[in-house]
Image: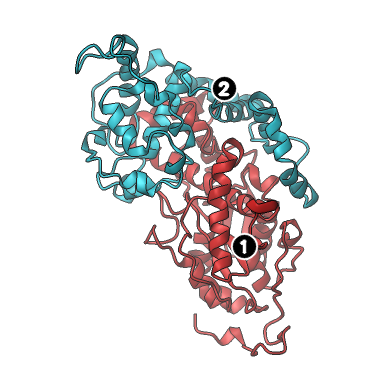
Chain colours: A cyan, B red
Amino acid sequence: MKTLDPLAGPIAPGVLSKTEQELRTAFLEEIDRIPGGARLNQCIQCGTCTASCPVSHAMDVTPRQVIAMFRAGAIEELLESRTIWLCASCYHCTLRCPAQIHITDLIYALKRIAIEEGIFPARFPVHVMSETFTKNVKRYGRNYEVGLLLRYFLRTKPLGLFAQRRAGYALWRHGRIKLRPDKIKDIDQLRKIIAKAETFDLPQEKVTSEKVTAAVGYESIGR
Amino acid sequence: MDTRYTYYPGCSLHATGIAYDKSMRAVFKKLGSELAELEDWNCCGATAYMSVQKTVAFAVSARNLAIAERTGDDVVAPCSACYYALKHTRVGMEEDAELRAQVEEALAAGGLEADLSVEVRHPLEVLLNDIGIPRLVAEQTHSLEEFRPACYYGCQIVRPFGAVDEDPELPMSMETLFTALGARPVEYPPKVRCCGGMLVATMPQVATELSMDLVDWAIAREANCIVTVCPLCQSNLDLINVTKGSNGPTHQIPVLYFTQLIGLAIGCTPEEVGMEHALIPPDAKAPPVGVSSRHDAPVTIVGTREA
């Protein structure tokens, strides 16, 4: 995390820098559209999320701190943390949160803002995986594991490929590596659907209403 | 044919998870249920698409639901990430009118529409509820007595939409199923812990630590195989077997799909359930019921066992 320069940082309690304000607006719009986003206010900082998280030990900011930092107006630091890219989407925090905050979905919202704003932790290119994945889908309609990994490693850490050679060989020897990507027949249809859906995700088209979002996608399980 | 399902294999089952695909088809065929592969299905978006664009992630997934509605059969998605993505799309569209309108508009751009009439299901739940344990026991031809599986459920079929069990912290359905089929599942406390998922590529040190822990637990409990329900869990755990040196496991352990074990029990050959694709083949054998492959093992007629 960045150390705050008292001369440059938040000017006074409650006063936010311009970037911070912009990020906050973007984030508030995002959480407005995610399941149970409004419940963020209900966080009692109990730490159940951090305790349940299988990767919290490797995070620089724990899930509990994510919410605390957001409320303290430190979104830029949050986006620069490794935490949001370490989340493996196992939903254990979401399941156990006593305030029923959908933490996994919140982290997804942070990932989307980070990608949109281009703010990432230094020398930590995990976001490239998600971007490569979506490119794969647009290109073939399906995800081609070998191509995905090759492209990811070539773009981020070419030497990482060498480290994976044993795994790659074992899988290949057991007939589990496919040498050619599958392409769907009606790729044009999928691309049209994606292009249309993208218009709803573009920043300028974001909904700015101040409505309180219901638990989208979770009513069936009573959350 | 008893029943018909729309089969959504997902990208992994065409490559690293090929044994899951083979065993799914073999088991459903043996039980007389038809699995019709979804026509021209596309990637579900998994966990990665949601990190980039939200509405697109839903729309990509919804195309599959829209195509599935042509036949109207329930969609069976064996991969946990596919199950979660499709289910989340269906439930999300049902509950959020705004999202639904946007996704429907996107689908319309491709000449499709979705009325959300098909259900998204996981094969474990289908085998337990539609086929049922009594039927599986009645169909059993081979004994699973030599198998001591550690039943591993992983993340996304238990959380947040419980596919099979009431209790998301301690599911027991696989244990119940395999006990009924004569296997002796071990107690396996980390059964719903995360295997690391896609971190295996992006943060290998972290993912290996998580997977290694799961393997160590199984070895400590003297399981002779780990049974999984997800292609990513399977390959993550299976790849621990080829990790060498001081970081490696104390010994290797076969990692199987639950459908492979069920397949063996109901008389599919090891080839039919894709056993050759496991990096470590199981030592345990599934001899015909009543014929013990070991002299010291008692002979049990599993067919008479109470369900």
Mark 1 — on which chain does it sit? B
Give the camera-side residue of B63 and B255: B255
Residue B26 as seen in the image, left or right of residue B127: right
Q: Report, in whole angstroms, how far the alpha carbon at label 2 lies from the one at label 1.
A: 37 Å
Q: Which mark is residue B100?
A: none
Q: Looking at the rendering, in which quadrant would you find the N terminus of chain A?
A: top left
Mark 2 — on which chain does it sit? A
**Dividing the picture into quarters, in which one does residue B197 lie?**
top right
Q: Position of residue B154 (x, y in %)?
A: 50, 54
**Residue at screen point 76% across, 59% down:** B276
**Residue at screen point 70% across, 67% down:** B282
Residue located beneath label 2 in the image: A192
**Residue at screen point 72% across, 60% down:** B280
Give the camera-side residue of A203 and A11: A11
Q: Which amino acid lies under the numbered mark 2 shown in the image of this protein?
A: Lys
How crowded pointer 2 is (Cα within 10 Å; few <14, some 14-19, many 20+) is rated as: some
Give the structural element (helix, strand or loop) at label 1: helix
Q: Which amino acid lies under the numbered mark 1 shown in the image of this protein?
A: Thr
Residue located beneath label 1 in the image: B259
